[in-house]
Image (cartoon, coloured by chain):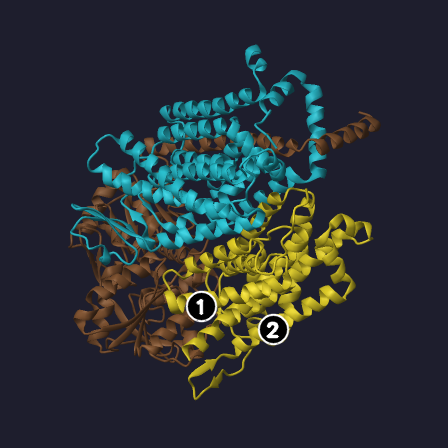
Amino acid sequence: MGFLTNLINGISLGSVYAIIALGYTMVYGIAKMLNFAHGDVIMVGGYVCFFAMGSLGLPPLVAVLLAVIACTCLGIVVERLAYKPLREAPSLAVLITAIGVSYFLQNSALLLWGADPKAFASVVPLPSLTLFDGQLTISSVTIVTILVAIGVMVALTLFTTKTKMGKAMRACSEDKGAAQLMGINVNSTISMVFAIGSGLAAIAGVLLCSAYPTLVPTTGSMPGIKAFTAAVLGGIGSIPGAALGGVLLGIIEIFAKAYIGTQFADAIVFAVLIVVLLIRPAGLLGKEIREKV
Amino acid sequence: MSLSRIVVRYVLAKEDSMTNNGMSRRSFVTLSGIVAAGLGLAGCGGSNQSAGSSGGSSDGSAAGAIKIGGIGPVTGATAIYGNATKFGAQVAVDLINKEAGSTVFELNWQDDEGDPEKAVNAYNTLMDWGMQVLVGTTTTTPCVAVASKTSTDRVFELTPSASSTDVTAGKDNVFQMCFTDPNQGEKSAEYIAKKNLGKKVAIIYNNSDAYSTGIYNGFTKVASGLGLEVVSTQTFTDDSAQDFSVQLNDAKSKGADLVFLPIYYTPASLILQQAKNMGFAPKFVGCDGMDGILTVQGFDTSLAEGLVLLTPFVASATDENTVNFVKAYKELTGTGEDPNQFAADAFDCVYAIYAAVKAENISATTPTADMCNTLLKTFGSGTFTYSGLTGKDMTWSSNGEVSKDPKGVVIKNGKYESLDA
Amino acid sequence: MERIKNLNKTTRSNIITFAIVIVAFVVMQALIAAHAVSHSIIGLLVPICAYVCMSISLNLVVGISGELSLGHAGFMSVGAFSGLVVASYLNASINSVPLCLFVSIVVAGIFAAIAGFLVGLPVMRLRGDYLAIVTLAFGEIIKNLLNNLYVGMDAKGLHFSMKSAQALGMDGGKILIEGPKGAVGIPQLSSFVAGFILILFTLIVVLNLVNSRTGRAIMAVRDNRIAAESVGINVTKYRLIAFVVSAALAGMAGALYAMNFSSIAPKKFDFNTSILVLVFVVLGGMGNIRGGMIAAAVLTVLPEQLRFIGDYRMLIYSVVLIGVMIVTNNPKIQRVLGDFKERFRRRGNGAAQEVDSLEGGASDE
């Protein structure tokens, strides 16, 4: 039974990583940039939802919606002010800017909301599920997290394959020049990806804080880095890859803690990543791009 | 200048920048050169002032205020503790100045981001300002780095919350307001054994944190001798302080009836939540870092029901000093949140210094090194006692460690209740 | 002056780089001697030296070799902890501070080089952002391992454990590294002079490497791996050389850094520190050694000089960071700046040319 409990916990943790990783991977796919500020957008989403529920007394679903809207707007504004002027700049310059944005968001949160932790009330006020005569308890948050992750995955896949905007997105990530020649507005497509990514970050933030209900200005940074790792593990740029990488990373983390020891869990997680990348240098589902001579 | 020439030049410059990628770097180098020069000047400007004040031994502060410096993380991951100590110290300084009717103390708090390098920078900034006594630093590793500086520069240092024994080791001028970590670990084990809180103990501690590891080591050293059986020892790190299901499952499966949490309240609140979710309800015991859990905004206090913690300070206490402190603290921060023990420790630091300053007739014109020697003799004499928010009749040994009794409290109906009565 | 102008461009640029370092050192020493600098500036000198060395060494990987490394602080920590163990060990027997410091920095370099080799072997199979994430992963692994490393010293010599301080089986003696607490009571041997010498050493190593046959091979691999391979350059070997040399230099900088403080914890050398060093390199211009050095110095001093802003300090810092990146990389702003420069050049022709020749830069991009 211990195994099953660990597996479920791993999938739950992994689902949160997966949603965060989706944001990373979409932005990377199209803008070829590592958006290190993504984790901090998650934190902002958490805070917005917290205050919407706590101070304004809104029902959870409305609060989540508000968080998504706020983060989407934030994503658009950040993209417009900080990243758009650097469209043609080398990718490392954009990386450093993203780090600057990350510092900015963290420190703004610190000034606005203080360093004291906030206890996040769960957005799913349902009782836990008890199976096998109480030997296995699954919290409702776990179930909702997994379901939402699956839902987001399916929606994103449909979006990128069926809609015009989604196809434009894929075209841009394949070849910007060619996409432009086909009449796609590359600039606005990139802006839109940032908006979607930030909206996803808000959902991830709410789920993360529901599952692990403590909110501080640095809440987003470590899950952000881990999710980034997950995105690379699955093959950065690939949407199913991000989902697979996220879930795997969650399971590995929990299993490493349970069966090898908590002391070296972080090292084991990253070691697995390295081994995977050595065997499959482009990640699990990443496309190996042949260099043409 | 005609418009056409500007246009031509613009086009030329455009071509230039398109062909020459080096442009950006060049302009940065020039730019930073200018900035560096500016900063250099600013640094020199600042130094002239300080040279004046340190050379003439605080002639500048003839107004009579003793300059207290404070160091602690106001930004970064540990900002919560730094802010608490900062505000706690500020409350004390304000109260003292109000009582005395004149400016006795002047407080200057500098951020160290919880990092030794930044702490030493902050210390140097304070020295330039003319600091005479240091309250700080808040966290352990930076405190050790700063303590070696104060020890050579002869500045008296009283730390509210840096609890490792390394902070005071080998330095005669550094004193602590909090328990040392191993001491607290031992006290906790004794307390659990004495009150018969549990026999099969599981421990979850943060092995990337000096405070937590220090208490853990102290606890395990004496636990078996006291008849406590440690059945499960699990760790987490700052980077993986989110999911505790594995640690709790281990404790549950090993049949622990008591879980000892020598950790801060932020991860502890997660542990309590997750334990409830999985239907695990042992007795939870914490240390002074646990204080503050009830005041976390939005925290479901029913989760902490029955939690036992050893803490020197209880914000809900009804004695006059605590009530006044809590009120003043809330007014100062404006957030409506109760002060935790870090704030109370910092408050006590300032008041203890005040007591010693009054007893020894120290004034702002006393040279810093003399002040340091007088204060360290007073504190280390063993006869100097101070009663404050975090303890009655506290005394200090000459090696800098404080001696005070921990208060055992249990959380009942969302409130602290004394266990010692 | 005439002779300097006749020299070849890279040599001239290198001479200027060395001259800047030496002049900065002499000026600072003079100011210190005249008591004209504040405590806070003096306290920053050794960290600045360490960060300048870090910047130069990372530039070798990021700028010259063209690989993005996000785990450079890991090598710094390997150097820092191995260096301070050696220093503590020797401090008891060797009286001479410079000798003790020298030996421990050299040992730190060797250990970091070994770590660099072990990390580099697998890493060099990867490219681009995948390489970046693996270096990040190694940085985190090193931090996690050091968080569990216990080293003690007693009459019998050194003891190591990966479990706890009790497991060291110490017979009295002193614990040098205690897991997450890191090291306390480090002998504070570092000095500005030592930092200055280390910068010079780092510069000599890197500039010589860059201008050698090996360096040209490394840059050829960076610019076009396939073309380089086709002319018989062993790609993996040259990438590995750059990586290991860079790791060794980072380790030495780490040892210098650690021995400036009496306590240091593994937490210090985390992802954020790696990023900090990367910011120096990118701001200074990838491959531009001198720019990276100046950026390191400026960005170490800047947050300290912003202290008067109080709570808004780090916020302003982040805005400055974003602003500088946009100003130096946005084509439109560059055009406007270029226009200003042009005007400036026409006005004071002589002076402007002087500035321009100074800015020749070691840019090999």
The residue closer to the viewer here, C341 or C226, is: C226
Q: Colour of chain A?
A: yellow
Q: Quadrant of residue B90?
A: bottom left
The residue closer to the viewer here, B381 or A279, is: A279
Q: Quadrant of residue C244?
A: top left
Horizontal and vertical percent position of residue A122? 53, 75
In this figure, which residue is indicated by the disc labeled 2? A148
Question: Can residue B321 be seen in this snapshot?
Answer: no
Horizontal and vertical percent position of residue A84? 69, 48
Q: Nearer the viewer, mark 1 or mark 2?
A: 1
Amino acid found under the numbered disc labelled 1: Ile
Question: Measured along the vertical axis of the image, is residue A121 above or below residue C207?
Answer: below
Q: Residue at x 28, y 63 (%)?
A: B216
Q: Colour of chain B?
A: brown
Amino acid found under the numbered disc labelled 2: Val
Q: Residue at x 67, y 57 (%)?
A: A194
Which residue in the rendered view is the most extreme toward the bottom?
A133
Is C284 left, or right, of B339 in this rendering?
right
Question: Can residue C83 be seen in this snapshot?
Answer: yes
Which residue in the rendered view is the most extreme toward the right?
B4
Q: Colour of chain C?
A: cyan
Q: Residues within 10 Å of mark 2 (few under 14, many from 20)?
A: some
Label 2, secondary structure: give it: helix
Q: Residues within 10 Å of mark 1 (few under 14, many from 20)?
A: many
Instruction: Give a yes or no on whether discs 1 and 2 share a subunit.
Output: yes
The residue closer to the viewer here, A75 or B50, is: A75
| Chain for numbered disc 2 | A
- The circle on residue A60 is none
Give the quarter of the figure containing the N terminus of chain C.
top right
In this figure, which residue is indicated by the disc labeled 1? A254
